[in-house]
């Protein structure tokens, strides 16, 4: 169900076709994107800088030499392959280097760009006529004419038609001088097609107020209307009003852990102006521990951009959900929100970079993404470099897997989402969750919804079971090779779904995401008369699953006496098949026993003045994806079970 911007689409300011090259002998590749070997002209190719849509058929001729180009040159650092190798070693429980993290300063000293590299790259760029407009530890931003960019990167910029619009892009792969000795990782911005991140949240517009209509169940199955038609051989219960922290903590085995001593960072675009007040009020109304002084903080940019293109206000609800969900699951964890200046790649990369450069957190929840077809190697390389640097510092990144199932209904093509497809992040899938009386965990299915409306005479469900509306993202990457930790766990029929080569399969782990069994969130919104008011409503999406898992990881890190878990995937897969997980299937009550809930919604999303609609939402119906016994492409290895948190004890 798409009560707002479902299936988050997102960001970008660069391209990237991820190139994953195996590591040196003996390394079971987590690949690392690198510049290509030098050509006969003494240049190093920067793979992925020519987008796939820049075809001969779409070519409309050369871009004017006086047009302006804004680009960002990412620095490879002094040991790109060594960074990837060390990131794997400190994350792998079977490695002698496991957990031997570096401080942010030591990581920069060991793997970051040298002053000499920065100086040489700057000299090259300015010598070509480009102006340096900004610099940080990993990149140099430049602007200049098309002619200057063409000279610097030894390519021609042409105009191309794409989706009814015309954009400029390199007509051949860009390159850097061989004399820089591989100091340049990649360059983004040589094409100016818009690349925007969207959040993976099934939620209503955060501007105008949204309310759920009743009746509700207070816990799964607590209220059923016997006068409504049956489905799947039984009367189906009303959807829950929205689970709270107490119920989620019980479902995922929190026990007495609270996440004390652990810091969780959250990245999104922009920032809600009412987050502090909303979070406090929500905790007070729903039984969560109150916030202590300094427990919730924000790191924000000096100014924002792309406000209209990114629907800035639409991100307020995302931040609200993420903050309230983390606090609900791990009420004593510190939370730092790091907002992006926009939903573009460069700004989201900056947010992630701030966390790594300042070692601001142990765990990072990210509820945004895009389809893999929009991912390009240059941008993927920039993201992976940050993820790897975070891994060597003991920072773990968690990304929602998407809200459109296999993406066929959304894009016409079966594909996964990104950055969840990165081998260096934990991709979080979604479930429909049943928590019963006394906060008892009953079951979960994979999140996938089909909707059938109540017939006008009230005697049947129309077109039962109805059309697919939304579901957890998952599947097999077409661009990222299978990482070592998935070998022997992910079935060949999934890893080789796109051919004979095993590839990265998504997700890794999962938690509640179905908006029909979702989380109660509280947020200040706009009333029809223009005034503001705090209200609460049920919400879902893998934007919920990601912060829930981040909260659970905070509990697990507390169980390790505060020792950072870091990049968690090797440890997550090491526990595969144990009591640490609920092994989620689409038919938890047995073969042939399908499940559903009844929902009543306001037609106008606010009140009953224009009437209500009643529908049946079937559960566990995720497009072509299926939650089955063992690893699957909806829920990964499963959801945290009663033994999960304790399994991380040293």
Image (cartoon, rainbow, N blue to C red):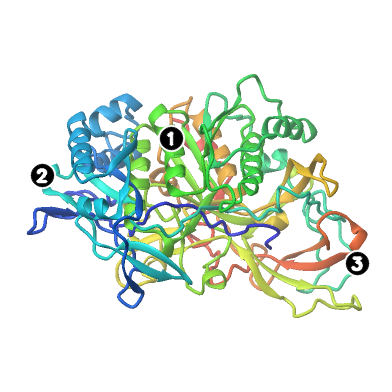
Residue at mark 1:
565
Quadrant in which residue 354 is drawn: top left
Q: Using the image, tell me which numbered label, if any, was put on residue 487.
A: none
The quadrant in which the C terminus is found is: top left
- 7 shown above or below 350: below
Nearest to the observer: residue 527 or residue 203: 527
Classify 10 Å Cα crowding around label 1: few (below 14), some (14-19), many (20 and above). Answer: many
- 480 shown above or below 302: below
Residue 382, visible in the rendered structure? yes
Classify 10 Å Cα crowding around label 2: few (below 14), some (14-19), many (20 and above). Answer: some
Classify 10 Å Cα crowding around label 3: few (below 14), some (14-19), many (20 and above). Answer: few
Residue found 90% across the figure and 64% down from its top:
611
Which of label 2 and label 1 is nearer to you? 2
- The reply to whether callout 3 and callout 1 are in contact (CB within 8 Å) is no
Nearest to the observer: residue 219 or residue 243: 243
Q: Earlier in the sequence, mark 3 or mark 1?
A: 3
Q: Earlier in the sequence, mark 2 or mark 1?
A: 2
Distance (Cα) linking label 2 and label 1: 40 Å
Q: Using the image, tell me which numbered label, if any, was put on residue 226.
A: 3
Q: Which structural element holds mark 1? A: loop
Quadrant in which residue 193 is drawn: bottom left
Quadrant in which residue 159 is drawn: bottom left
The percent coordinates of residue 504 (x first, y second) are 38, 59
Residue 488, visible in the rendered structure? no
Q: Using the image, tell me which numbered label, if any, was put on residue 179.
A: 2
- The reply to whether callout 2 and callout 1 are in contact (CB within 8 Å) is no
Q: Is residue 269 left or right of residue 240?
A: left
The percent coordinates of residue 164 (x first, y second) are 48, 72
Q: Is residue 426 left or right of residue 608?
A: left
Distance (Cα) linking label 2 and label 3: 77 Å
């Amino acid at each position: 169900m798409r009560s707002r911007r479902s299936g988050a689409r997102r960001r970008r300011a660069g391209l990237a076709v991820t190139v994953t090259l195996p590591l040196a002998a003996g390394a079971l590749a987590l690949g690392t994107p690198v510049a290509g070997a030098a050509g006969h002209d003494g240049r190093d190719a920067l793979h992925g800088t020519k987008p796939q849509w820049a075809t001969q058929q779409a070519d409309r001729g050369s871009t004017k030499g006086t047009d302006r180009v804004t680009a960002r040159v990412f620095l490879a650092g002094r040991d790109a392959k060594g960074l990837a190798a060390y990131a794997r070693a400190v994350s792998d429980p079977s490695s002698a280097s496991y957990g031997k993290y570096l401080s942010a300063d030591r990581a920069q000293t060991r793997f970051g760009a040298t002053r000499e590299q920065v100086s040489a790259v700057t000299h090259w760029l300015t010598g070509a006529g480009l102006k340096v407009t900004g610099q940080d530890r990993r990149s140099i931003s430049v602007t200049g004419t098309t002619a200057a960019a063409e000279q610097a990167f030894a390519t021609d910029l042409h105009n191309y038609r794409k989706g009814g619009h015309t954009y400029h892009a390199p007509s051949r792969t860009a390159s850097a001088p061989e004399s820089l000795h591989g100091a340049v990782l990649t360059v983004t911005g040589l094409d100016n097609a818009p690349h925007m991140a969207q959040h993976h949240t099934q939620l209503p517009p955060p501007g105008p107020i949204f309310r759920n209509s009743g009746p509700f169940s207070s816990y799964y199955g607590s209220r059923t209307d016997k006068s409504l038609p049956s489905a799947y051989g039984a009367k189906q219960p009303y959807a829950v009003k929205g689970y709270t922290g107490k119920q989620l903590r019980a479902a995922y085995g929190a026990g007495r852990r609270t996440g004390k001593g652990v810091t969780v960072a959250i990245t999104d675009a922009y920032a809600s102006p009412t987050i502090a007040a909303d979070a406090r009020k929500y905790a007070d109304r729903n039984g969560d521990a109150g916030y202590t002084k300094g427990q919730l903080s924000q790191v924000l940019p000096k100014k924002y951009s792309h406000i209209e293109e990114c629907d800035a206000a639409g991100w307020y609800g995302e931040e609200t959900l993420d903050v309230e969900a983390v606090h609900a699951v791990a009420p004593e964890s510190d939370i730092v929100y790091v907002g992006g200046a926009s939903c573009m790649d460069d700004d989201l990369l900056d947010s992630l970079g701030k966390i790594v450069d300042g070692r601001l957190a142990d765990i990072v929840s990210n509820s945004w993404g895009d389809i893999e077809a929009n991912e390009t190697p240059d941008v993927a390389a920039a993201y992976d470099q940050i993820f790897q640097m975070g891994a060597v510092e003991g920072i773990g990144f968690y990304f929602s897997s998407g809200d459109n199932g296999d993406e066929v209904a959304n894009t016409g093509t079966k594909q996964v989402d990104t950055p969840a497809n990165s081998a260096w992040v934990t991709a979080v899938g979604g479930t429909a969750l049943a928590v019963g009386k006394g906060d008892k965990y009953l079951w979960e299915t994979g999140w996938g919804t089909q909707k059938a409306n109540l017939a006008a005479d009230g005697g049947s469900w129309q077109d039962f079971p109805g059309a697919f509306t939304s579901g957890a993202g998952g599947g097999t990457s077409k661009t990222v090779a299978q990482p070592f930790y998935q070998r022997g766990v992910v079935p060949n029929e999934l890893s080789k779904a796109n051919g004979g080569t095993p590839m990265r399969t998504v997700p890794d782990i999962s938690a509640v995401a179905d908006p029909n069994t979702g989380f109660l969130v509280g947020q200040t919104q706009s009333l029809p008369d223009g005034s503001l008011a705090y209200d609460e409503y049920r919400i879902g999406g893998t934007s919920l699953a990601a912060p829930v898992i981040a909260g659970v990881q905070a509990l697990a890190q507390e169980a390790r006496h505060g020792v950072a878990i870091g990049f968690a995937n090797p440890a997550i897969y090491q526990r595969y098949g144990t009591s640490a997980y609920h092994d989620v299937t689409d038919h938890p009550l047995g073969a042939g026993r399908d499940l559903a809930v009844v929902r009543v919604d306001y037609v106008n999303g606010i009140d009953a003045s224009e009437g209500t609609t009643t529908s049946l939402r079937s559960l566990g119906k995720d497009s072509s994806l299926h939650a089955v016994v063992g690893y699957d492409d909806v829920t990964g290895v499963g959801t945290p079970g009663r033994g999960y948190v304790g399994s991380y004890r040293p």
